[in-house]
Image: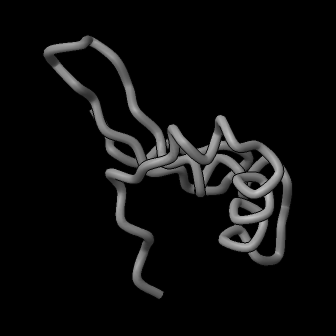
Amino acid sequence: MSNIKLFESKQIRSVWNDADQKWYFSIADVIEVLTDSANVKDYIKKMRKRDPELNINWGTNCPPPLN
């Protein structure tokens, strides 16, 4: 199974967890594809600022791509 998924020709990083039998996706990649945001990090920062519950549960297991 591929670790890169395509959505409208844009890459979304993912990983399959055998124990959970679930796919996990990079939220930054998903937000970039769905919003067409020029600055994904800023978009996420503003979302977290507006929603305290989202901010509490925020974490990352997927490093950003190297450009």
Instruction: Identify the residue at horizontal 65%, vertical 56% (top origin).
Output: 10
Q: From this viewpoint, which residue is outermost toward the bottom?
A: 67
Q: Is residue 29 left or right of residue 34?
A: left
Residue 27 against residue 42 in the figure, above or below: above
Q: Does residue 55 appear left or right of residue 15 in this picture?
A: right
Relative to residue 22, is residue 28 drawn left or right? right
> For the N terminus, which image quadrant?
top left
Residue 11, percent from left and from top:
55, 55
> For this rendering, which residue is in front, 66 or 62?
62
- For this orientation, the residue located farthest to the left is 19
Picture quadrant where residue 16 is located: top left
For the point 66% across and 43% down, the residue is 7
Q: Position of residue 4 (x, y in %)?
A: 41, 48
Placement of 61 over or under 42, stated as above or below: above
Q: Position of residue 37 (x, y in %)?
A: 83, 66
Q: Image point 44% across, 51% down: which residue?
A: 13
| Relative depth, front residue between 1 and 59 | 59
Residue depicted at x 26% and y 12%: 21
Q: Nearer the viewer, residue 38 or 50?
A: 50
Q: Position of residue 47 (x, y in %)?
A: 77, 53
User: Image check: 48 left or right of 66?
Assistant: right
